[in-house]
Amino acid sequence: PAAPPVGLLPHTFERRTLLEHVDVDAAFAYHARRGALERLLPPWERVSAASSPPAPSSPPLAVGTRVTLTTRVLPLVRVAWHAEHVALDAPHAFADRCVGGPFAFSWLHEHRFERAADGAGTYVVDRVHYAHPLGTLGALLFDAPLRRMLARMFAYRHAVTRADIAMHARANRAAATAAARQWHRRCRTAQCRKPAVSTWR
């Protein structure tokens, strides 16, 4: 079965964070690399993740990719969450829906990467549309704690994303600086002399 249209999912949670001096391509690429999901799982959730791409050569965010998250809620009780990637608009967005677990076919998670209007960076946006399995009663009992859990989880994910991208940028700058210094040292030892005869005609 298909996921219900967003309009039929009555609840929405959104977390938006500005990554300063980061372009849309870099923000998307971070999430598209292999191992990104595992990196972004909060340690307190004790969740294991396994992915099943539609083909061995498929990229991690390919439409049709299945992801299974398993967590232990009691010493002998495990709960599995099965998600499927249903949309990809690189480098601006991708989306997944829950196809198995407590919110099967009533949970749609949009990941968006939006350039800041002033050019200051990129907004990472996580937007979740959902319906409670028990309807109105479920919303009354569980919506407040669910939203607190989502707020904590996405705050962690966005903080890790910002820190990792900044670390990668520093590493790239350091590598570029080291390469430039090596080039200048070679020039000083006459390993990059200009040709004696010009080839221009």
Image (spheres, rainbow, N blue to C red):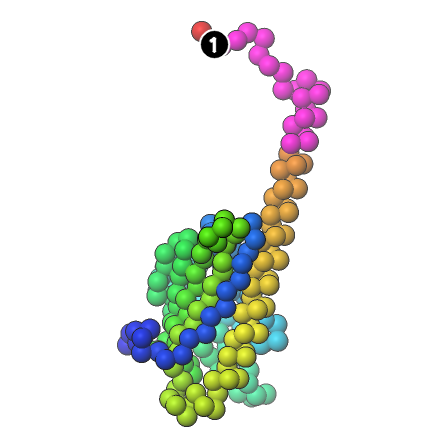
178 to 65, vertically: above or below = above
Q: Residue 164, position in %: x, y?
A: 60, 56
- The residue shown at (35%, 78%) is 9
Q: Name the residue furthest left.
A: 1
Q: Is residue 53 above or below residue 173?
A: below
Q: Which residues are magenta?
A: 180-199
Return the residue at label 1: 200
Other residues around mark 1 within 10 Å, as few (<14) / some (14–19) / many (≥20): few
Left or right, residue 12 beside residue 40: left
Number of labelled discs? 1
Residue 73's x, y, as percent? 55, 85
Frontmost residue, 33 versus 28: 28
Relative to 117, does residue 174 appear above or below in the rendering? Answer: above
Which residue reaches farthest bottom? Answer: 137
Corner quadrant of residue 181: top right
| Amino acid found under the numbered disc labelled 1 | Trp
Q: Residue visible at 57% across and 69% down?
A: 155
Residue placed most toward the observer, 56 or 154:
154
Where is the N terminus found, in terms of image quarters?
bottom left
Whether 81 is among the magenta residues is: no
Q: Is residue 92 left or right of residue 155?
A: left
Please give the name of the residue rendered at 70% of the width and 26% of the height, measured from the top-left corner.
185
Left or right relative to 4: residue 74: right
Residue at 47 percent of width and 70 percent of height:
14
> Observer-nearest residue: 13 or 76?
13
